[in-house]
Image (cartoon, grey):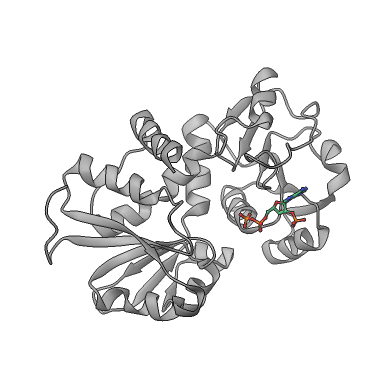
Amino acid sequence: MPSVTSTTLKAGVIGWPVDHSLSPRLHGYWLDQLGIDGVYLPLPVAPDDIADAIRALPKLGFRGANVTVPHKEAAFRTVDVLRPAAERIGAVNTIICKEDGKLVGDNTDAFGFMENIRAAVPAWQGAGLSAVVLGAGGAARAVLEALISAGVDDIRMANRTSARADDLARHFGSQVHVVAWDDRNAACEGAGLLVNTTTLGMTGKPPLDISLDGLSAEGVVNDIVYAPLKTPLLAAAEARGLTAVDGLGMLLHQARPGFEAWFDGKPVVDDKLRTHVLAGRAES
Ligand code: ATR
């Protein structure tokens, strides 16, 4: 690694814990590839210290930071200015420190989700599409924001705890139709996109029990889960000839806007990056 000086551009990821985060590996790769004098650090911050730590970023010369679990809502409350996506999602995952010391909060998860779908299906169009979203946690909020921005006006949302889905429907608007968790198979009828934002299918969790029979023949199935990369849901989608999109791309693409703002470079998501980041996952 080249030596770090006072002019080296600084950013990082704030979380608690943060050791599992793949972001230092991801940004480190881009910095290296683009030959930028910058560093990207893991920044473990305890919940009690989060507002102070965020406020200190510009004072310590940081260009900004990513924010991960459990601090995205606290970051939302702490920044000075919210970009529209962060405002609508209700969480901040990217902070940009302005020259005047003001903190701008953005949420790039919706962007990352959409770019991941478009990378797999370049002709993907939201208008006229019916989509099924499973789950109603933080990831679902980003997916709803992305789908509504892309013009999808029929979003069928099912969550084990239906009150959480009701809250999201109230927040995001009439495009979101809540469906009972037990009716998730019927909800897929004629849908062109199915997104799993639940933790089902993740390593160590039960698989997601769903029938893909009703999806349209050109349907796209996306799993937000990326450990394992090929979840049972994606394997089933592939076996049916549907387009299966894994969750790693969302992580990689959501990182681009922050990198561009902090380091003033154009990062590229490609297979070499995927391999590099996955090797980090194997080590952790
Ligand atoms: P995130 O913010 O990352 O989306 P989260 O808020 O913990 O994570 O949400 C996890 C999602 O997985 C929720 O929709 C959760 O359903 P509940 O709202 O009912 O908790 C869903 N989930 C987790 N385990 C599940 C299970 N065994 N069956 C069905 N859904 C499950």
> Depth check: 108 or 18 in front?
18
Above or below: residue 152 compared with residue 120: below
Q: Could you tell whether 39 is left or right of 138 in the image?
A: left
x and y percentages locating residue 24 in the rendered image: 34, 51
> Depth check: 280 or 210 in front?
280
x and y percentages locating residue 60 in the rendered image: 25, 75
Instruction: Give the residue at x 61% y 58%.
Output: 138
x and y percentages locating residue 213 in the rendered image: 80, 26
> Depth check: 74 or 91 in front?
74
Instruction: Give the residue at x 79% y 53%.
Output: 177
Total number of numbered discs in the rendering: 0
Instruction: Give the residue at x 49% y 43%.
Output: 250
x and y percentages locating residue 274 in the rendered image: 40, 34
* Residue 237 shows up from this direction: yes
* Residue 128 shows up from this direction: no
Above or below: residue 241 compared with residue 89: above
